Structures are given as structure tokens and as C-alpha cells.
């Protein structure tokens, strides 16, 4: 009985680790067909990050479908190769945090050394799951005005989301978010994540502060239909991902001054 209990506990822990890993990564899926619309099994599909050269590979099943999981956010090139057919390459596919991307490929008869290159992003309409939300892109973080350089001030850009940053009764800063009219009931109803880990205060489950805005790659606000990996709070999810670097050396320099000399008196 003790051995069986330990086995069950190990399975639960491994399952929890798998679910947590999906918070910072996403997946790309699709169907590979030929020019007659016949599905093609055993096609090798490779996703390559254009900024880091990170790659993951999958093979289509008997129905011509493939699934590449655990892809970090970034811009990718999707390549499908099969003997006797020209390689299909779609470049410039943007993969956002917690968003499942679909890229379908059509292979033409020809030499493997010949390529059919498609430039463009994946379809904007999500047909993979029922998730509803919005991704705040890095360009918005860089160019939009940020109160106190807090990226959470951009939460209001998502329809149905209302953000309020205050201090709690013991003086700690907290971020309270209402999604589609949700209340927190004194204990919070929105889940906050930072690079896959919970980023909430232990007092009322409100949002902790995020790193400097220059360190944030993007974040996604999921307002409805989120998967089981997020299934802890009822109102929604705020999922923040920091930058992981590229093959090119770069940095940033900024000055932040909030002058109160011209503020009105209380």
C-alpha cells in the first residue's frame, strides 16, 4: 500500500510539472496535404526560432496532422519536408505566450532541394481551442506610456479588464484586476504568472510587482476558456514572460524621472 501511494504521488507531481511548463511555452499544429488535398503521413515538420535558432521537430500521423509543443515565444519558420516533394517553408510565424498557433502546409511534387516559401504570419482567428484573450506585444510595452514603468498599467487594453494598483492594509503594493465584472471576494479571483511561476501576494492573491519593463517580452491576458493548466482561479489569467535573449548582442539605456514639482496640492 505504501509503494502504491508513493507511485500515485509521483504521478501527480509529474503531471503538475507538465502543466506548469505549458504556462511559458506554446504549440504549433496543422495538417500537411499534397496539391490534391490528400493527407500526407510521415512528413517531418520543423519549427525554428529565427532569433535563437532553437528548433523542435515532429512527424505527421496517419491523418497528416502534426503537433509541436513547448515552443518558447518568438518568431518562427515552419518547414515541412518529405522525399519526392518540394519543401514547404512558412517564415515569419509569430508565436505568442499561451496562444496555440496553426500552420497548414501543402507539398508540391518536386526535388527535395526545391523550396516553396511563404512569407506571413499564422491566421489571426484561433480555431484550435476556445481560449479568449489578448497578448500585449513588446512593441506596445516599449512605446505605450507606462505609469511608474509598470507593465500592468497596460492591462486595461484588453476588453473587459479593469486594473487598479493600490497598497494593501500592511503597506505592500498590490494589483487588483476585475475581468468581465468579476469580484475578488477578499481573496482574489485572477491568477498571475511570471515565467511559469505564481506571481501573487500571499495575503490576498493579488498581483505582485513585475520586473523592469525592459526585461518583459510580452504578456497575455486570458479572459475566458483557458485550459486546465491555469485552472486555479475563476476570473482569468495574467501570464507574463521575460526576455530570453537572441543571437545578437543588444541592450537598452533609459532615464526615468517622475517630477512632482508641478503637482497640485492635496
Image (cartoon, rainbow, N blue to C red):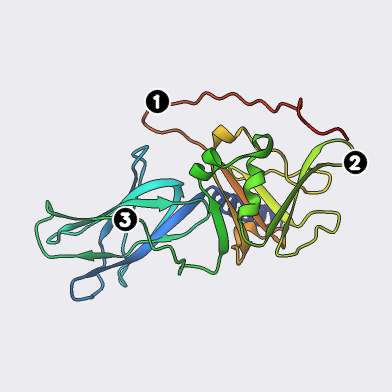
Screen quadrant of the C terminus: top right
88 versus 260 height, above or below: below
Identify residue for label 1: 249
Identify residue for label 2: 169
Compare residues 241 and 158 and report the one nearer the observer. Answer: 158
Could you tell me if residue 2 is visible in this image?
no
33 versus 179 height, above or below: below
Could you tell me if residue 16 is visible in this image?
yes
Q: Say left or right for 119 vs 254.
A: left
Residue at 67%, 52% in the rendered image: 6
Pair 3/1: label in front: 3
Residue at 12%, 53% in the rendered image: 114
Residue at 42%, 26% in the rendered image: 250
Residue at 56%, 65% in the rendered image: 131
Q: Which mark is residue 54?
A: none
Compare residues 19 and 119 and report the one nearer the observer. Answer: 119
- Which quarter of the figure has residue 157? bottom right
- Which quarter of the figure has residue 181? bottom right
Amino acid at each position: 500500500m505504501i509503494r502504491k501511494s508513493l507511485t500515485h504521488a509521483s504521478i501527480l507531481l509529474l503531471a503538475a510539472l507538465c502543466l506548469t511548463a505549458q504556462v511559458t511555452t506554446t504549440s504549433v499544429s496543422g495538417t500537411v496535404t499534397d496539391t490534391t488535398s490528400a493527407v500526407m503521413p510521415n512528413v517531418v515538420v520543423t519549427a525554428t526560432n529565427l532569433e535563437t535558432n532553437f528548433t523542435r521537430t515532429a512527424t505527421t500521423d496517419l491523418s497528416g496532422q502534426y503537433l509541436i509543443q513547448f515552443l518558447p515565444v518568438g518568431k518562427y519558420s515552419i518547414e515541412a519536408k518529405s522525399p519526392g516533394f518540394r519543401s514547404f517553408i512558412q517564415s515569419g510565424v509569430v508565436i505568442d505566450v499561451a496562444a496555440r498557433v496553426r500552420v497548414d502546409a501543402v507539398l508540391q511534387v518536386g526535388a527535395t532541394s526545391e523550396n516553396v516559401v511563404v512569407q506571413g504570419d499564422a491566421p489571426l482567428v484561433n480555431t484550435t481551442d476556445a481560449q479568449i484573450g489578448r497578448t500585449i506585444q513588446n512593441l506596445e510595452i516599449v512605446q505605450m506610456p507606462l505609469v511608474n514603468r509598470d507593465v500592468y498599467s497596460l492591462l486595461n487594453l484588453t476588453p473587459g479588464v479593469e486594473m487598479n494598483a493600490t497598497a494593501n492594509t500592511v503597506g505592500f503594493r498590490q494589483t487588483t484586476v476585475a475581468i468581465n465584472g468579476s469580484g475578488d471576494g477578499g481573496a482574489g479571483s485572477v491568477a498571475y504568472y511570471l515565467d511559469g511561476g505564481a506571481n501573487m501576494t500571499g495575503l490576498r492573491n493579488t498581483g505582485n510587482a513585475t520586473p523592469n519593463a525592459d526585461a518583459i517580452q510580452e504578456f497575455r491576458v486570458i479572459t475566458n476558456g483557458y485550459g486546465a493548466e491555469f485552472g486555479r482561479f475563476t476570473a482569468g489569467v495574467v501570464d507574463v514572460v521575460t526576455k530570453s535573449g537572441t543571437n545578437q548582442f543588444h541592450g537598452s539605456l533609459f532615464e526615468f524621472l517622475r517630477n512632482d514639482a508641478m503637482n497640485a496640492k492635496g
